Image (spheres, coloured by chain):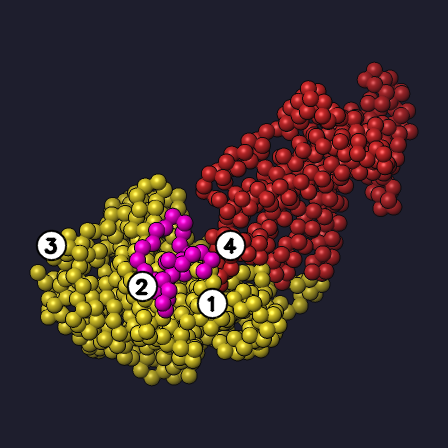
Chain colours: A yellow, B red
Amino acid sequence: MNDGSVLRLNNVSVALRRGRGDMVPLLDQICLTVNQGEMTALVGESGSGKTLTSSAIIRLLPRNARVSGQIWLGNTDLLRLPHGEMRKIRGRDIGMVFQNPLAALNPSVRVGAQIREAYRLHTGESDHAAWVRACELFDEVGIANAKKRLGDYPHQFSGGMRQRAMIAMALACSPKLLIADEPTSGLDAILTRQILSLLTRLRHEFRMGVLFITHDLSIVQKYADQVHVLYAGRSVEWGSSEAFFNAPRHPYSRALLGALPGPGQIRLTAISGALPDPEAMPLGCRFAPRCAYHKAECDWCYPKIDNKGTTSVACGRVEDIVSVHPPKGMPSPQYFRSANDGAVILKIEGLGVDYRLPARGILTALTGGKNSIRVLDDIDLTLRYGECLGIVGESGSGKSTLGRAILQMVPYDGSVIVDGIAFGRMTRSRRKMMRRRIQVVFQDPRESLNPRMRIGDIVAEPLRLAGEREYREQVRRLLDRVGLHARILDKFPHAISGGQAQRVAIARALAAKPAVIVLDEPTSSLDVSTQAALLNLLKDLGHQDGLSYILISHDVAAISYIADTIAVLRSGRLIEVGATAALLAVPGAEYTRQLLAASFLYGKKGTVQLAVAPNSGSMGIPS
Amino acid sequence: MIRMILTRLISSFFTLTILITIVFFMAHATPGGPAFSILGQKATPQAVEQLNQKLGLTASLWRQYVMWFWHLLHGQLGYSYLLNRPVRQLVGDCMVNTLALYASAMLFSVTLAIAIGLIQGITWGRWPANLIRLLELCFYAMPTFFVGTLMILYLSVKWRIFPTGGISSVRISDPGLLDYMRHLVLPVVTVALLGTASLSYYFGASVHEELGKDYVRTALAKGLTFRAVLFRHVLRNALRPLVTMVGLAFPYIFAGSVMVETVFNYPGLGYLLWRSALSQDYPVISAIVLLIGCLTVLGNLFADIVNGLLDPRERYE
C-alpha cells in the first residue's frame, strides 16, 4: 500500500443493535481514501453517518455497534488490531479535533495539562519536555503568549482560540492522520476561514492527511483535495474537489449545491421530504424517495456505481441527468429591488444598550461604581414597509442584543419608533399593546415552542389573546401560508422536524398580525436543504405578502439571499449600512470586505454557479 | 475566594439572626410553658406565677428577647429550666455524641456512595446498574425507625452481636474506646444506609452524565485507557453535585437525628431537641436551633469552597 494513501476505508459497514431487536444498518459499504498531505472532505447532512465513520476509524463506537470491512492506516488494518494496540494508535497516529471545543476540552483541567497528557502518554517524555512541546505547538497553531495561556482553563479562551488549542492537542505526537469532525460549526465566517487556513498550512508542513467532516459544502471547495458525499449512510458521490464543484453528477450533490444561498439567486433548491428512517431504508437507492430524477428501477435496484466520469457516482441514471440538465451558471439579473420608498414602519434612533456587570462586592455596589459595558452604541436604522433588513456580525457583535432591544426585552436608551410612535413615550398599557406589533422567531425552534402544547394551540394563542373567537380557520390559513399541512395541528412539537418547527414559529409570529418580525438566526440550526426551503419561504412572505422583517444572522450568504438592506455590526457599532447589491459589489469598510471574503468561499462572487435540479417547481420533471 | 468566604459569613450572620428570632417567638407563643413541665399539670397558679418570676418569664416578650440576645452576644446561653444545667454544657455533651455518630456515618456513606456510584455510572442501562438502582430505592424508601428497630431486633436481641443502645453509660477513655465504638455501630449503619442510598444514586447519575460528555471522547481519542479517563478526567467533574448534596445534607441530618437517636436511646442533639421541645425549655431549644443554623451555613460554605477547588469556572464568579 505505497500509493501515498494514509487512510483507506474498504467496504466499511456499521450496524447498531437497537434494544434486543435487529441490527440497524447505519453505514453501508463506505470506501474512502485520504492521501498523505491532502484533505478529504466527508460531506453530509445530519444523520448521514459522517460522525459514525470517524468513530469507526478510531474505534470508539458505542458498545452495541458492529463494524465490518477494512480500515487501513498505512499497512495496518485497524479493525483487526487488539484493543491495547489500537489505544496506542489513537493520539499518536491519528489526531482528533471535535466540534464545540468548549465541551470537548475538560473544563476543570488546565489546557496545558491536557496537551501535555496527550504528548507524555505516547512518548514517555518528562513533564518538562512535554511543556516545551506544548509551547511549540501553541506557537505553531498561532496562540500568542503560549507560556501564559498554557496555564489557563478552557473557559478562559475564546471560541476560535479553543479550537486552535484543540488542534494543538491533536498535533502533539505529529500524527499521520488528522480527523477534524465539524471543527468550524459554531464559529463565524472569519474564524472558520482562519481555522481552515491553519489546517491547510499544517497538513502541508507535516505531510499529514486530513479527513475533514462537515455538513457545509460551501467551505469545502477552496480547501479540500477530495470530496466524498454521504447520504443516509451511503456514499453517493466522490472524486476530486475540482471536478466535483465543476460538475456535480449525483442528483443529491446537485441539490445540495443548489441549496447554498448566495446573493442574486432567484430561488434556492429545496430538497423535499426527509432522510429515510434507518430502520426502514429504501431497498434500492436511498435518495430515491426525494430524487427529482426518480424512476421505478431506482426503488429496488442497488444504485450502479459509475466510475467513468470526472467523479464516481452511485446512481443508475447519471447519463440521463447530465444530458437533460447540464449545470449552468445562474444569471444574476436586475434582481435586487431598488431602494424601497414605502412608508417607514420601524425607526431606530441613537439606540444604545448597557450591560450591567454583577456587583463585585458590597462596597462597589453601595458606592455605585461604574459597572457596566456598553454593548451597543449609537445605532440608527430604518425599516420600510415590505422590506427585509439583514443584520450581520460575528458572535459577540451585539446583534442579538439589538434584536432584544427592538423587542423591548432589554432596557436601552435612544428610541425605537414603530408606526410613528416611540416606545419610550407610551403608557404602560399602550406599550403592552404595541409590543404585539413586533414578533420574534428564535434560533432553536424546539426550545421556543412549549412542548406541552399542540401545534394548533401554539399558533392559536396570539389569536386568542387578541380576543378572537373563530380562530380555527385562521390557524389553518396561517399554517397553509408557511407551507404546512393541517395534519400537523394536533401534533406536539417533539413529533415534528426542525424545519417544520421553525415554520410553526413563523406562523405563530404571523398570527399576531405584527408590523415587524425579528428573526434571530432562524436557520442556523437547520440542515442545508431545510434551510433553503425556509429561506425561500421567508423570501416569498416578504415579496408577495409585504411582510417587513429583520433578519439577524452571522451567515452573510443567507442574509444576502433575502435581505434588501444589510447592516454590518461589529463590537456594538454599525460599520456599514447599505442596499444589498451595492454593499456586496462595493463594500465600504475594510471589515465588511473581510467578512464578505470569508463568507463566499463557494463559487464566484455575485454569480454563484448553480446546478438547478428540476424539482424547484417551475421546470418540468423529466420522465 | 477569601472575599467570597467573608461575604458569605457576613450575610449568614443576618440569616442566623432572623432564624433565631423567629424560633424565639415561636417557642414563646406556644401555649403552656416550662412551669407546667417542671411543676406538673396540677400545679397551683400561685406556684406557677412564682416560678415564672424566678425564671424571668413575667417580663414582656420583647424585653426577654433583648436580654436573651444580649447574653448571646456575650457567649452566654443560659440555664436549662428543666435540667438546671448550663445550656452550653448540655448542648456541648450532646453535640460530641451527635458529631461522632454523623461524622462516621457521613464518611461511610460518601466512600460507599463513590464506589457504588462509579459502578452504577459505568454500567448505566445494564443489569448491574439496574440492580444497584433497585437496592438504592429500597433503602431510600425504608424509614429510619424501621431499619433501626430491625437491626436491634436481630443484631442485638436475637444474635447479641451489638448492644441495643445506652451509649451514655460508656466513657471515651482508653479502655472504654472499643466499647464506645461497639455502641456506635448500629446507629451509624442505620444513618449510613439511608445516606448511601441517596448519595450513590445521584453520584451514579452524574458519573453517567459526565461519561457522555465530549471531553471523555477527546480523552479516549488521545489514547488514554478507560480507567485513566475515569479517574483523571471524569471523577473530578462528577464529584461536584455530590459535594453540593453533602453540604445540603447537614440540616436533614439533624432533622433525621431525632428519629435515630430516639430508637437507639442515643443522647445526641436530636434527642435533646425533642425533649426540650416537649417541655418548652426555651434556652435549650434556641441554642440547638442556632447550632443547627450555624452548621447548615458552614455546610453550604464548605460545599461551595470544595466546588470552587474542583471547578475553576466557579472561582471567577
Q: Which numbered disc, 4 or 3, marks the residue closer to the eye?
A: 4
* Residue designated by label 1: A92
Label 4: state its secondary structure.
Answer: helix
Identity, as a three-letter code, of the amino acid under mark 2: Leu
Specify the amino acid type for callout 1. Arg
| In this rendering, the label closer to the viewer, 3 or 2 | 2
Q: How busy is the neighbourhood of tag 1: few (under 14 within 10 Å), some, or many (20 plus)?
A: many
For label 4, the residue is B226
Q: CA distance from mark 3 to mark 2?
A: 31 Å
Q: Is residue A457 visible?
A: no
Earlier sequence position, callout 2 versus callout 1: 2
Q: Quadrant of the C terminus of chain A?
A: bottom left
Say the numbered circle drawn on residue A9.
Answer: 2
Viewer-proximal residue among A140 and A72: A72
Query: Residue sitting at 59 percent across and 37 percent down?
Result: B197
Chain ID, mark 3: A
Q: Chain of mark 4?
A: B
* Front residue of A166 and B83: A166
| Circle 2 chain | A
Along the horizontal axis of the image, is B286 left or right of A143?
A: right
Question: To which residue does mark 3 refer?
Answer: A296
Figure quadrant of residue A582: bottom left
| Magenta-colored span | A57-85
Q: Going from the N terminus, do you reach mark 3 or mark 2 first?
A: 2
Please tell me whether residue A464 is drawn above or below residue B259 in the rendered image. Answer: below
